[in-house]
Amino acid sequence: MEVSWNLWHGCRKYSAGCKNCYVYRGDGKYDVDSTLVRKTGSFALPVARGRDGNYKYPSGTCFMTCFTSDFLIEDADGWREQAWDMIRERSDCRFLFITKRIVRFNHCLPSDWGDGWDNVEIGCTVENNVEAQRRMPVFAEVPAKHKFVCCEPLLEKVDLSPWLNRDIDEVIVGGESGIEVRECDYDWVLDLRRQCVEAGVKFYFKQTGAIFKKDGRYYSVPRKLQHLQARKAGIDYYPVTPER
């Protein structure tokens, strides 16, 4: 069971991947200032209880954390300790977040983090080579039990090979969706797949994006077909290795 847990909302654009942010696009429809980071009514969602006194969300729930902001954004420094407390309390559930601000990770840890918590999965976004060079050396040193790289939106051919090893569980790749979007080239996708195969790291082609280039031709892919077309490519890679 997957549940969205957007405990705070709002963000500030941080790098090239943020240019056409879906949060800004959605907020713009309602004249909401996306740069204002504020706690939401769902802040305590994982520890909410029903009338019977039991947690509303059962053991094993996966909380998709902070997808309308960034879990490591500076504006939330005053709230994050409470977030860690809830994640600690619900050690029977999984918590997954993706961040562009991995360089702040060591400044945002709870005191008992150690080498990571079993129930926390951390994704580092890498959209181009500038960010690969900036974020991946930091991410490689992050103490965590579960780490993955999210190349979405993929904006160019990216070299992750220096940092792909058994500490990285998966690389997720996808193009950009929306109205004003940048292309995703299938050659870039295949090159990342090659890197993952050579390193024995799981590879998942999530979506094509709205403008997809293949064999020199450009395709306009409707939103409802972007995931389907990625699946049809049949290029996901699952290494046959012992569980980590």
Image: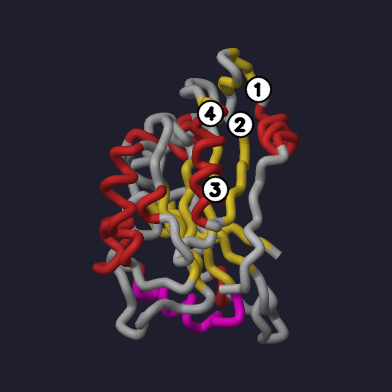
Question: Vertically, is 220 above or below 107?
Answer: above
Asked whether the beta carbons under mark 2 and mark 1 sit within 8 Å of each other, the answer is yes
Return the disc, 3 or 4, that comes first in the chain's sequence.
3
The question of residue 92 being in magenta is answered with yes
In this rendered view, identify the residue nearer to me: 48 or 154.
Answer: 154
Q: Where is residue 125 in the image (x, y as percent from the top left)?
A: 42, 48
In this rendered view, identify the residue nearer to me: 224 or 125.
Answer: 125
Q: Mark 4 points at which residue?
A: 187
Residue at image point 54% right, 43% down: 194
Q: Give the range drawn in magenta.
A: 81-93
Q: Dot 2, crowdedness within 10 Å: few (<14), some or many (≥20)?
A: many
Q: Name the residue under label 1.
A: 221
Residue at image point 49% right, 36% down: 22
Return the disc, 1 or 4, that comes first in the chain's sequence.
4
Residue at image point 39% right, 59% down: 71
Q: Name the residue under label 2.
A: 208
Instruction: Tell me the kind of residue under disc 1.
Output: Val
Instruction: Tell me the kind of residue under disc 4.
Output: Asp
As measured in the structure, the alpha-carbon distance from the residue carrying label 3 to the one carrying label 2 is 12 Å
Residue 159's image quarter? top left
| Quarter of the image that includes the C terminus | bottom right
The question of residue 84 being in magenta is answered with yes
Return the disc, 1 or 3, that comes first in the chain's sequence.
3
As measured in the structure, the alpha-carbon distance from the residue carrying label 4 to the one carrying label 2 is 12 Å
Q: Mark 3 points at which residue?
A: 172
Q: Which element carries disc 4, helix, strand or loop? A: helix
